[in-house]
Image (cartoon, rainbow, N blue to C red):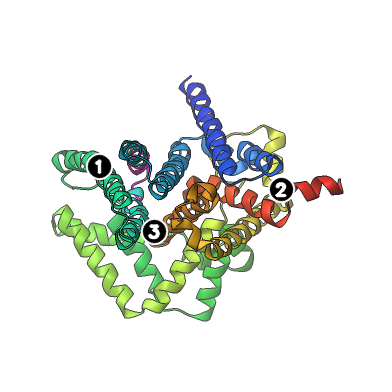
Amino acid sequence: SYQKILAAFQILILFLTQILSLKILKRLHVSKVWCAFAIFYIGISPAMVNSALSLYSEIAIYPFLLGIILFATAAWQSLCAEIPGYKIFSYATGFALCFIVSTLTKAAFELIFPIFLIPFLLLGLHFFLQKNFSAFKNSLVFLAAALIIFYSAISGYKWLNKTYNGQFVITDRGAWALYGNTDRRMATLTWKRFFVALTYVPGEGVCRRLFSQEECSFWSFRESDARGFAKLNEFLQKGIDKDQMNKEMISLSLQKIGQNPAQYLLFMGLEGLKMFFWESTQIGFVAYPDWLQRLFEFDLFKDGLRLAIFLLTFGSVTYSIVYISRNRRVLADAQFQNQQSIGVLFFVLLMIFVYTGLHSFFFTLTRYSLPIAPLYLITIAFAAEHILPASKMLKRV
């Protein structure tokens, strides 16, 4: 049965995710107790285990997203320590390859890649202004190698799509999905409609406990997809070229945003907040033993777990932001190798916020947040280590 073979393979991917997460946690100098907590939870998390036992693409992202963090940190540290250029090139290659696989799995990473290069560009500028031309040259090596390797592969794939499907894209869902969500968000806003949207953030189940199904459905993916498909079909009936059709829908979306940008930003924020509600026992498409299914459907357990993980995630990310802001000067320090935890945490947070920011333009399903779930658990362990050190806990025991 291919299901058993696939499940075994994907569980191995989850195991690799645990190994790479442990590697990152060690670079953050997290104690064994909190490392054990984070790694153990990756193995029992209902949402992450569900992704390892289904055909969702999220499972394939886990190790490569963590690889991006590890290669980015290693490259940053090497640039600050002025390590020879050939090592910088090897890190750039690993960095670009991880982004290539991630992009071919989730097209959003095509946009995340150039944003992730901005810190390296600023670091190179810093070296230039400091007249550290050796480090500046290495920065150029990293940037050039990463750009050439990534865009050579991605452009090749997009040219194949252009040849066989008529569009120079990784996937063609972006334009109509953007329009559908924009059109819904820019609908006439009332206080009640806003509160319905607010209750939809933790999940549709919460919304339906407080409002009617019709009111909640307005903020579901079904409504945004219906609006996007309606506009798509309208263009198709007119016989408009696919590339032109995408440009038109993006242009219409921008026009709608321009009518009331504050309202659009408000709903972007609510959509981004959904990313913190990543834990769930109700993702679906996996059959569990009866006793476990009953546990996953028990309201107190499923709602309590989702709320508890949300609070831990939101709190730990907030703490990590404060920690980085207080130690930001260390990032470009020549002795960065002695402060590598700052760099690791910086790239973890950068990935979380860029990934969340890009998805906030669209509708966020729970499973869309799963690729960054290991990063959330890493920040939880990091915050726990600083707020409640394991050494003090053991003394109390």
Query: Is 297 a magenta residue?
Result: no
Q: Which residue is mark 3?
A: 358
Residue sitting at x 39%, y 75%: 187
What amino acid is found at the position of numbered circle 3 in the picture? Answer: Leu
Q: Which residue is mark 2?
A: 298
Q: Which mark is in front, 2 or 1?
A: 1
Q: Secondary structure at mark 3?
A: helix
What amino acid is found at the position of numbered circle 1 in the picture? Answer: Ile
User: Which tag, 2 or 1, sits closer to the chain's start?
Assistant: 1
Q: Which mark is in front, 2 or 3?
A: 3
Q: Which residue is mark 1?
A: 154
Disc 1 from disc 3: Cα separation:
19 Å
Estimate the x, y position of residue 236 in percent, counting from the top left.
19, 56
Viewer-closest of 342 and 376: 342
Majority secondary structure of magenta residues: helix
User: Which tag, 2 or 3, sits closer to the chain's start?
Assistant: 2
